[in-house]
Amino acid sequence: MKKFLNAIIVLIAFHSNGLISQDVEEIVVTSALVDTTEITNPLYVIDGEDILDDATTSLGDAIDSYLGVSIADYGAAVGQPIIRGMSGPRVKILKNGMVNRDVSGLGVDHLNDVDLNDISQIEIVKGPSSLLYANGTIGGIINVVDDTISTVNFESPKANFGLETQSVNDGEAQSFSYKENIGGFNFSLGFKDVNFGNYDIPDGAVMHEEEEHHDEDEHEDEHHEDEHHEEDLGYVNNSDFAVEATKFGISKVGDWGYIGFGIDNLESVYGIPFHGDEHGDEHGDEHGDEHGDEHGDEEEGHDEHGEERIFSTTDSETFSIKGSYNFNGSLINKIDFTYRDSDYTLTEAHEEEEHHDEEEHHDEEEHHDEDEEEHEEHAPTVFANQATEYGAIFDISNDYATQKIVLNFVDEDNSIVGEEAFMNPANNEEFTMGYYLSKDFDLFNVDLGMRIDQIDRSGSVTDEDHGDVDNYSIDDTTNSFAFSLGRDLSDTLDVNLGFASVERLPSVIELFMNGPHMATGRFEVGDPTLSAETSNNFDITFSFDNGDYYGYASFFVTDVDNYITLMDEDEDHDEHEDEHHDDEDEHHEDEDGHEDGHDDHGHGNLIHANYIQENAEFDGYEIEFGRTIQMANGDLTLSFGRDVVNAEFTDGHNVPRINPARNVYSLVYDQGDLLFKINLKDVDDQNDFGEGETATNGYQMLDARLTKTFDLDGKSKLKVSLFGRNLLDEKARNHASFVKDQVPLPGKNVGIKFNFDF
C-alpha cells in the first residue's frame, strides 16, 4: 500500500461557507452527492429549470459559460467538458451519482450520452466529496441529477410539455414528462425527441489546409476553388444531430428510507463532420496524374467519395436500482445503495455502403479494383461498453462529525469491432474503499476525503507488421486524498484552502490504442507500460458577499507527475519515439515539405502520435465580482469574471489542447415572472500551443435569453423563452478541439421554447 499523504499541510484556521456564484440564482449550497447543507469544496449546482428554459445543446455547451469550465467540441452533438484544463478520463460524467458508462472516452468524436430533459440540477464538484463517487478525478466530476427514482413522495400529479425551434440548424425538439404518486408509489416518465439539421456557420469560417501550408504551390488554384465551394455552402456538412430519449422510474418512500428502479433508453444519430483519410497520399501518388481532382487535391478529411455521409448511431440502455435504508443505530445511521447495468453501443458507418453495388456498375473498368478496396474500408465500426456496477455508502455520522464510508465495484468491457477498430477488446475491474469526513470546529471547518482503488485492466496489442498479439494485465492500487479547511474572516469574507493528491491509472485507450484514428486524423499508439498519474493540487479561494456586492477569487496550482498526453511525433521528442517505438522509422520530409509519416504502414495521410508521459504543471485562477441593484420591482445583477489556465511540461513546452483565457460579462434581470439574461464571453487568442498544434484566434460569443412565465389558473403555467446564441455571428473555434479548423462553432442562432406545466 502506498501512503495516502504525499505532503504535509500547514494547518491554518480558516472556514468557508462555500462558493459564490457567477450567477447567484443558479448556485446553491446543497449537493445531492454528500447530502449536507453546506459544502466547503468549490462547487456549482445549476438549477435544472435553467437548463430546461435554455436552448437544447450538448452537456459541455450547457455549462461552458461557468468559470473554470470549457469544452472540447466535435460538431454540435459532441461537447466533452473540461475543468481547469483537465479533460477526458480526468473528468468523470455521472448520472445520479454513478459514472455514465458510455464510450466518450474511446474517441473525441463521441458524445457524452446524458439526457438533460427534466433534470433537477447539474453539479460540478472538485475536492473531497468528488472522491466518494469516482476514481482518477484529477479534474473533478459533473453529476446530472434527476428524480426518475424519486427519494421523496410526489405531492400531486405534474406534467410538462415542451416545444422548441432553432434557426441555426432548422431544428426542432419536443419533450414530455409526467410525475404522480399512485397507491403510495412514485411514477416518473420522461421523453424527448430532438431533430437538428446541419448547422450554419459564418462566411469563411472553415479553415483549409492550404491556409496553413502555403508551400503547396502546385495545387494552390485547385485548393482555392475547393475553399470557395465549401464556404459557399454556409453550413458544416454532416453536423446534424437527432436523439430520442426515454426514462421511466418507480420508487417507494417511507420512514425507513426509499427504494426504486429506473430504466433509461437513449438513441441518437449524428453526422461526423470530419473524417481523416489514411490512404490519401497513396492514391495521390498512384493516380494523381490521371485523377488529380479526385485524389490529389482533396482537403484533409475528404476522400474520393467526398459527398458520402459519415455518421454515428448510438443505443444506450441502463437499468438502475437505488435506495436508502435508515438504521438509526449507534454505529450506522443509514446505507445508500446502488446497482446499475449499462449496455451501450456506438456504430460509425458510411451511408454510401448501401449504394455500393450500383455505383460499381457505373465505374470504369480501370477503377474497379480501387473502388472495391475503398468500399471495403468503409465497413461499419462498432464501439461497445457493457458494465455492471454495485455501490454502497455507509453514513456513520455522529454529533462530532459527518462521516461516510463508500464501497464500490465495477466490471466493464470495452470493445471496438470493424474496419476502423484501433484497439483490441479490453476489460476493466475496479474495487473501491473510500472515506469522507466533515467537521465544523469553532474556528474552522475541515473536509477530508480519501479512497483506495484496486484496479485490474486487461487487454492486448496487435503488432501491425507481423500480426503478433501481446496480452497485458495491469493490476495496481491507487490512493487518493483530498483535504480542505477554511474560516470566516468576517461576516462578509470567507477563505478556503484545499489540497488534493489524486492517482489515476491510464485508461484502456492510453494503454492499448494501436491504429488509425480517423476522428483525430492520427495513427495513435498507446503504451501498456505507462505508469499512474499523480496529481498534487493546491488551491485557495476567497469569497465576499455583503448583499449588494459580491466577489470570488480562486487560485490553483496542480503538479502532475507522469501526465499522459497524446503527442504528435516531432524531432524535439525523438527520445519518446525511441523509448516507445524503437522499431519504427523516423519521419522524413517529402518533396513538398510534408511528412510522409508511415507510408510503409499505408497510413500516409495520418499524423503519427504516441501516448507519452511527462511531468506537467497547471496553474491559473478564476475571479469574479458583481453587484445586485433593485430596479423596477426586480433585481438587476451585473458581473465580470475571468478564468485562466496555463499548462506546461517540465521541459518548457506547452501541454496540447489547453483553451485560452476568457473574460465573461453578465447581466441578469429578475422580476419574478420575467427573467432576462445576457452573457458576453470574450475569448483570448491562444498562442501557447503544443506540439503539432497551431494558434487559435479569439472570439466574442454573445448569448441572451428572455423567459416570461404566465400563470394560467393557479395550477398551470406557461413559460415562453426567446433565446439567442452567437448573436454577433462570430467565426469561432475551440482550441481544445482536434477539428477546430475544419469544424468551427455554429453561427448566429435564435429560437423560441415553450414549456407548459399543469
Image (cartoon, grey):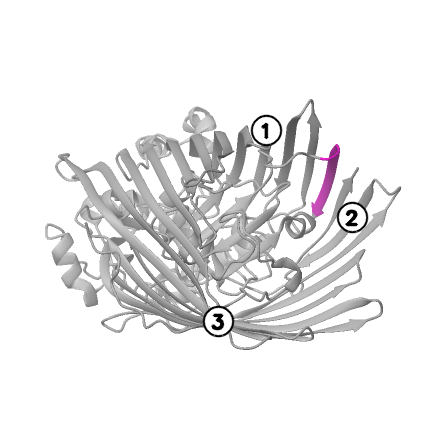
Callout 1: few (<14), some (14-19), or many (20+) C-alpha neighbours within 10 Å?
many
Viewer-proximal residue among 631 and 649: 631
Q: Considering the numbered disc 3 on the image, is that residue within a helix, a strand or a loop?
A: strand
Can residue 418 be seen by looking at this rendering? no
Disc number at residue 719? Answer: 2
Instruction: Say what amino acid the circle numbered 2 marks.
Output: Lys
Q: Nearer the viewer, mark 3 or mark 2?
A: 3
Give SS at disc 2: strand
In the image, residue 605 sits, relative to residue 654, either above or below, namely above
Q: Residue at x 45, y 46 (%)?
A: 93
Q: Which residues are magenta?
A: 155-165
Looking at this view, name the residue that lies furthest to the right: 713
Residue 4: percent from left, percent from top? 26, 56
Mark 3–mark 2 Cα distance, whole angstroms, equals: 41 Å
Q: Residues within 10 Å of mark 3 (few under 14, many from 20)?
A: many
Residue 591 location in percent, x, y?
24, 62
Residue at x-position 12% and y-position 36%: 466
* Main secondary-structure element of the magenta-colored stretch: strand
CB contact under 8 Å: marks 2 and 1: no
Q: Amino acid at mark 1?
A: Ser
- Residue projecting furthest to the left: 583
383 magenta-colored:
no
* CB atoms of marks 3 and 2 within 8 Å: no
Which sits in the foreground, 623 or 479?
479
Query: Measured along the vertical axis of the image, is residue 727 above or below residue 113?
Result: below
Would you name the residue on which mark 1 appears?
A: 251
